[in-house]
Amino acid sequence: MPQPRTAAGARTRRRILDSAEHLMRTMGLSRVTTKEIAREAGCSEAALYRHFTGKEELFVAVLRERLPALGSVIGRLSADPGERTTEECLTEIARTATLFYEASMPIGSSLFAEPALLQRHRDELRKLGAGPHKPLEALAGYLRALRDAGRVRAGTDPDAAASLLLGACYQRAFLRLFVGEEASPGSADDFAAGLVRTLLGGIG
């Protein structure tokens, strides 16, 4: 059971998270163990378990705290877009999604090589209320609210539009990691802006 935060506890947790991120990037999620993470962090495995319930919770913490904050960006813009236009809001989401997928794909891709481990990881993420479908659901909800408010076309399918936007971001990340930057040149900012302009051409 994770322990309450103290100053010393917060420092230990930060070291564990630093080590987890480093090892997950360099070894892959499927190969790294809590024992190796604890050793890298300079603490015992028992100390690690005082902060995290296991590798799955560590993985979720790395995604939420160390990578571009896709979920929180969607949540913030859904709650209060301020004076920003629909295009500006969706462009921020697309840019964040692009950077998030580029950062997270190398960490989690090794799971797909081991079906049993993937199933165990899937089960644990379900218990934590996490998973790659959560940003998609959140974005579809945001687009549904935009449609209901008359900010996008009345016939828009929010689920399809969310899949188009996040799917394009994921595809760019995959190509850049697999083929190299030449597969999708240009900055994340330019890619996001062009993607949203094209998408809004259909639903705006």
Image: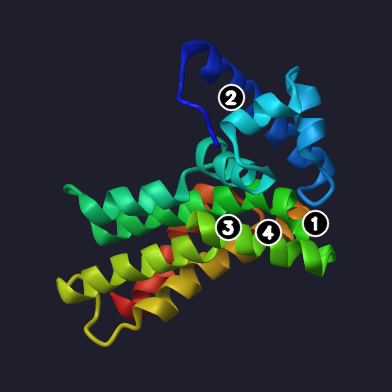
Which of 105 and 6 lies nearest the eye of the viewer? 6
Q: CA distance from mark 3 to mark 4?
A: 6 Å
Where residue 165 sits in the image (x, y, percent)? 47, 68
Name the amino acid, label 2: Arg
Task: Decide: few, some or many residues near mark 3? Use Cα within 10 Å; few <14, some 14-19, many ≥20.
Answer: some
Find disc 4 in the rendering and name its residue: 121
Find disc 3 in the rendering and name its residue: 125
CB under 8 Å between discs 2 and 3? no
Which of 41 and 156 lies nearest the eye of the viewer? 41
Find disc 1 in the rendering and name its residue: 110
Which part of the image, by quadrant, shows the N terminus? Answer: top right
Judged from the image, the secondary structure of the residue bearing numbered disc 3 is helix
Task: Decide: few, some or many residues near mark 1? Use Cα within 10 Å; few <14, some 14-19, many ≥20.
Answer: some
Find disc 2 in the rendering and name its residue: 13
Among the two numbered marks 2 and 4 on one chain, the one whose residue lies closer to the N terminus: 2
Q: CA distance from mark 2 to mark 3?
A: 20 Å
Residue at left offset 51%, top offset 28%: 3
For the question of whether residue 125 can be seen, the reply is yes
Judged from the image, the secondary structure of the residue bearing numbered disc 2 is helix
Among the two numbered marks 2 and 3 on one chain, the one whose residue lies closer to the N terminus: 2
